[in-house]
Image (cartoon, rainbow, N blue to C red):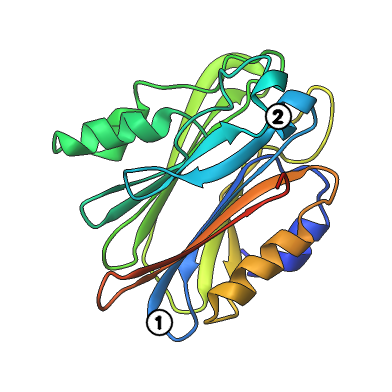
Amino acid sequence: MKIVNIAEELSSNSYPGRGIVLGKTPDGKNAAIAYFIMGRSENSRNRIFEENDRGGIRTKAFDESKMTDPSLIIYNPVLKLGGKTIVTNGDQTDTIYDFMQEGKCYRHALLTREFEPDAPNYTPRISGVVKPNGDYVLSILKSNMGKPQCLRFFYEYPAEAGRGHFIHTYKCDGNPIPSFEGEPTPVAVETNSLEEWTDVIWKNLNEDNKVSLFTRFISLETGEEETRIINKNV
């Protein structure tokens, strides 16, 4: 598969939905993470990211008076467990956390889950786990070509300096919205600066649809973390 430029990949798609990028910086010193959310409806756009008390972030209504349905949009996108970082687009973050806390695999957790119950879109559940050495896994639980049958896919990647993988919920905009197709997209991680990593992703997300972005670098030597959060609603 071709290694693509993340800026070009994002700017060419007005609605990838929610997305996860996992990889390693060019100098090989840090694991690189990005998670973003987008929205078309007022309810979906009425959100922000804020830090939670488990080493990650949660989504929260920006204006509580405008929140009409918290299901599927209020959850913990990022949680830490030991030296591992869990990143997902839904409450399966907690499912993975609970299973791993019991010594089980993230796969076991996701075998108990399926795509979101939002027919006719059947939004895929995308998930990732970054290990202490920088290696990472990705998964997508999606409908069977729009039919309410769950297909589960799991991918495992060794960390490689200057490389990463990008997975998102939707192939593009539409009605119903078509699910992501194929394997996670190989992308180049072209910077050792968290500021630049954050900036290139945020600037290339569609201005009308982007809502929030979380980025993090994790030192593979010390485990120290550096995090950025950008919310369109401020």
The image position of residue 72, as x and y in percent, is 56, 22
For the residues bearing labels 2 and 1, Cβ distance under 8 angstroms? no
Q: Which mark is residue 178?
A: none
Identify the residue position indicated by label 1 in the image.
28
Q: Residues within 10 Å of mark 1 (few under 14, many from 20)?
A: some
Q: Looking at the image, is mark 2 or mark 1 earlier in the sequence?
A: 1
Is label 2 or label 1 in front? 2
Q: Which mark is residue 44?
A: 2
Q: Is residue 33 above or below residue 26?
A: above
Q: How many marks?
A: 2
Q: Is residue 148 above or below residue 115?
A: above
What residue is at 24 percent from the left and 57 percent from the top? 83
Outermost residue toward the left?
103
The image position of residue 18, as x and y in percent, is 63, 41
Dot 2: what SS? Answer: helix
Dot 1: what SS? Answer: loop
Residue 72 in view (yes/no): yes
Residue 5 in view (yes/no): no
- Quadrant where the N terminus sits is bottom right
- Amino acid type indicated by mark 1: Gly
- Amino acid type indicated by mark 2: Ser
The image position of residue 100, as x and y in percent, is 22, 38
The image position of residue 110, as x and y in percent, is 37, 29
Q: Residues within 10 Å of mark 2 (few under 14, many from 20)?
A: many
What residue is at 71 percent from the left and 60 percent from the top? 202
Q: Is residue 72 left or right of residue 234?
A: left
- What's the distance in space between the residues labelled 2 and 1, CA to CA? 36 Å
